[in-house]
Structures are given as C-alpha cells and as structure tokens.
C-alpha cells in the first residue's frame, strides 16, 4: 500500500504546483489514482460522491451565511462597532488598541469568514487608529490575529465544511467553538494590555474623555449587530431553529440593517448576491473534490497506510498533537486554510479518533490551526488583506502578527491538554435541549 500513497502524494504536489484550481486538483488526483491502481467504475463513484457531499443538510446553511456576510459588508456596521466600543475600550490598558479584537470578536458572530471579518473591521479601524497615533505594528498585529476569529466563533464557514466532511453535528461543533474563541480573544487582549503597559509610547495620550453617560449612549450603535447576533445564535442554541433556518433569519436581519442604514440599493445588492454565489460555488467544488479524494484514498488504503506508519512511531497523544500543530503550520505556509482542511482530514481525523480524541474537539483544534495559516507567509490571506489596507510589506505585517500566532499555538496546546474547554458548552446546552 506504500506505492499508491507515494504516487498520490506526488501527483497532488505536481498538479497543485501547476496552478490548477484546488477543487479540480482533488478530482484529477483521485481519478488518476483510482485508474492506476483499481479497476472501478470511476464515473459512477464520482457522481455518487458528488451527490452525497453536496446534498448534505448541513451544507444548506453555507450559502445563506455567506450571503449574510456579504450583505453586512455593504453596511456601516464596522463604523457602528467603532463608535459603540471606543468609549468602553478607553477604560482598558492600551485603550483603543483593543478595538480590533473586540470588534472582530463581535463581527465574527455574524460573519463566518476570516477574510470578511478582517476586511470589514480593518477598513475603518486601521485608518482611525493610525490617525489617532496608535503604533502601526500593534494595530496591524491585533487585526491580523483577531481577524482569524471569523473561522472559530460561530457561525463559521470552515466549521460547516468540517461538519460535512467529518459527519458530525454542526450545532455541537458551533457550540464547541464559542469558549475557545473567547479564550483566544482574551489572550489577544491580555497581550495587548501588557505590551501597552510595558511600552506606553505605543499608545497615545487620549485627548477625548468619555463620561459614563457617553458610554451607555454609545451602546445604541451596537444594537443592530447585537440583535442580529442574538437572533442567529440564540435561535440555534435555544433549539428554536436549525442552523439553516437561523442562517435564513440572519440574511433577513442583514438586509434589514442595510435598508435602515441606507446602504441598500439594487446595484449593491446584486453585487452581494453575485459575490456570495461565486464564493458558494468555489466552496461547493472544493467540498465535492475533497469528498471524492477521500473516497478514492479510502479505496486505495492510503489512510490506513499512513495511520499504521504513525502508529509504529508509538507517539503519545500530546506528541501526536504537537506533530499536527507543526504539520499544519508548515502546510499553512503554502496552502490556504480550507485547502489544508480538505486535503488532510481523511488522514488526520482517523488518527485523532484512534488516539482517543473526540471528533468535535478535533474540529475546534483543526480550525485553530487553520487560523494560523491565515497569518503565516507566504500565502497568509489575512496578511494580504492588511497589506492592501496599510501599504506595508507582507514581511512587515507578518512580523507584526507573530505574537498573536504564538498565542494561537499556545491555545492549541491548551485545548489538547484540557479538551473540556471545547466540549463543556456543547454538553451543557445539548443536555438542556434534551430535557425540554
């Protein structure tokens, strides 16, 4: 079984290096591997695999969450978040240096996309904080790190893909991402506050003073996004709506926010629908290709071969986790996060389950490692977004993001040492729902 493994790996590297789309590369590699080593009806296997993967009920929520994020991108939600959070952030050490983390954490609850979170918050916060005199490396780093929370804090597009490929409950997976997401956000804020205290020159002396009445009045600016967040997440976690139904409510809420803010026009709405259709089609192709590749690798016995090889190393569970962290960090330097997930999941998930870890927990863990890929050069997508917003070099932005990358690495090991961080909330909520 070693020969098929080597051939498929070499084919994958060659085809990906050729510049072919990741989704089509997955189809081609699986088809070639099966044709070389098996005499099977590839056309029937392909059609069945594509049909089964793209008709998964969990996948129905995907285009709706993408459309919700695209509609919100048209609105002034980032400006409202700045206005609503600034008076409260001024109470913290580092003051408005925390804005990126706070705003990205809140926006992630209605976005599902790391890129959308980074772009939406960054296009306002970078200019505003730079104008006020905040250190550019600090605000670039906080945006790079916090922007990745769009993958972890539900609703998350990557989590939907994982739930489909791993055949796990999407609601449980969403719930499992909440506490780790807030933990990482808290880690970012603690680091930012400590750095501001250690080097006061990074934070300007604020000329604008806020009274408590100013702070409470500023909460009005947070009402639209808070109402949308509560309607989407509350309906899911309260057992009122399925993820797909909650996503439909989210689209309606986003359209309402856009209408009330004066941002809605036929042209801009058409643009949002078109971008959502393109993104959904791209992800759909990747999911179908990943499903076909996983099926082909299963027929060829590749996961069993690799699992046997790693089992022969006799790694402890924590050593396996450390190996996977390094593996995904290196992979993230060359592949976008979603590509890393779909390429590796057929191999890594059986290993993790065999080692005694929960597949829901592994969904959170692998999303954290994929978040790291968003801020590791040379293909860290968040780095390119921040470069386009600031005009700085990729190398400079990547250096600014290093401390936040290390915080995410630490979070991955914390999750491994204490899996209950991710599994506590799903257990509590699902038990409550069963008692209703």
Image (tube, rainbow, N blue to C red):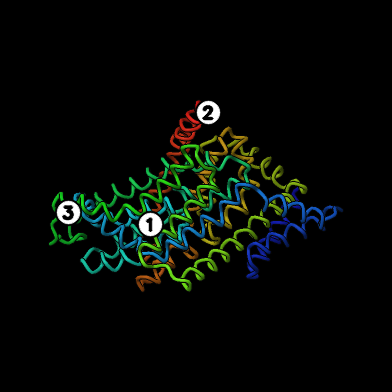
Dot 1: few (<14), some (14–19), or many (≥20) neighbours within 10 Å? some
Q: Is residue 148 left or right of residue 289?
A: left
Find residue 402 and name its label: 1
Q: Of tags 2 and 1, which is closer to the observer?
A: 2
Q: Position of residue 57 (x, y in %)?
A: 63, 47
Reading the image, the residue beneath label 3 is: 214
User: Which residue in the rendered view is the most extreme toward the right?
Assistant: 39
Residue under label 2, please give it.
434
Query: Residue 298 location in percent, x, y?
Result: 74, 46
Look at the numbered discs 2 and 1 and tell me whether their residues touch, using CB distance below 8 Å.
Answer: no
Residue 227 spot, x, y in % from top left: 37, 49
Mark 3 or mark 2, which is nearer the start of the sequence? 3
State which tag comes first along the sequence, 2 or 1: 1
Query: 241 or 364: which is nearer to us?
Result: 241
| Horizontal relation, residue 344 to residue 114: left or right | right
Residue plotted at (38% across, 44% down): 182
Which residue is drawn at the image coordinates 47% and 33% (left, top)? 429
**Mark 1 or 3: the one toward you:** 3
Q: Are marks 2 and 3 in contact (CB under 8 Å)?
A: no
Would residue 373 be found to the left or right of residue 392 on screen? right
In the image, residue 296 sits, relative to residue 396, either above or below, namely above
> Is disc 2 surrounded by few (<14), some (14 to 19) or many (20+) residues within 10 Å?
few
Question: Distance from label 2 to label 1 (Cα)?
Answer: 43 Å
Residue 163 spot, x, y in % from top left = 59, 45
């Amino acid at each position: 079984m070693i020969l098929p493994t080597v051939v498929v790996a070499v084919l994958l590297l060659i085809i990906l290096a050729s510049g072919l789309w990741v989704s089509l590369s997955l189809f081609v590699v699986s088809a070639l591997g099966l044709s070389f080593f098996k005499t099977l009806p590839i056309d029937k296997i392909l059609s069945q695999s594509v049909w089964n993967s793209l008709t998964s009920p969990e996948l129905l929520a995907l285009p709706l969450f993408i459309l919700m994020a695209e509609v919100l991108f048209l609105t002034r939600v980032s400006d409202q978040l700045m206005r609503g959070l600034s008076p409260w952030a001024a109470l913290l050490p580092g003051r408005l240096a925390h804005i990126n983390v706070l705003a990205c954490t809140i926006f992630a609850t209605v976005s599902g996309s790391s890129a959308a979170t980074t772009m939406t918050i960054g296009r306002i916060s970078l200019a505003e904080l730079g104008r006020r005199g905040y250190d550019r490396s600090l605000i670039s780093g906080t945006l790079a790190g916090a922007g990745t929370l769009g993958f972890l804090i539900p609703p998350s597009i990557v989590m939907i893909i994982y739930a489909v490929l791993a055949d796990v409950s999407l609601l449980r997976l969403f719930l499992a991402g909440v506490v780790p997401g807030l933990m990482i956000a808290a880690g970012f804020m603690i680091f930012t506050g400590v750095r501001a205290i250690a080097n006061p020159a990074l934070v300007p002396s604020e000329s604008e003073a806020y009274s408590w009445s100013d702070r409470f009045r500023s909460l009005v600016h947070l009402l639209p996004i808070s109402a949308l967040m509560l309607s989407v997440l509350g309906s899911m976690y309260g057992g009122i709506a399925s993820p797909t139904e909650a996503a439909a409510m989210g689209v309606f809420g986003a359209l309402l926010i856009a209408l009330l803010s004066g941002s809605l026009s036929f042209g801009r709405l058409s643009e949002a629908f078109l971008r959502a259709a393109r993104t959904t089609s791209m992800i759909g192709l990747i999911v179908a290709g990943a499903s076909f590749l996983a099926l082909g690798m299963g027929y060829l016995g590749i996961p069993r071969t690799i699992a046997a090889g790693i089992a022969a190393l006799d790694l402890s569970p924590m050593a396996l986790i450390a190996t996977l962290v390094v593996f995904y960090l290196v992979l993230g330097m060359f592949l976008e996060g979603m590509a890393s997930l779909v390429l590796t999941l057929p191999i890594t998930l059986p290993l993790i389950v065999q080692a005694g870890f929960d597949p829901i927990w592994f969904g959170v863990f692998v999303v954290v490692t994929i978040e790291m890929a968003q801020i590791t050069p040379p293909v860290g997508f968040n780095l390119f977004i921040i470069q386009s917003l600031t005009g700085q070099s990729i190398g400079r932005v990547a250096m600014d993001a290093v401390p936040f990358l290390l915080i995410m690495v630490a979070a991955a090991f914390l999750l491994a040492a204490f899996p209950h961080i991710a599994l506590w909330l799903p257990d509590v909520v699902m038990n409550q729902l069963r008692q209703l």
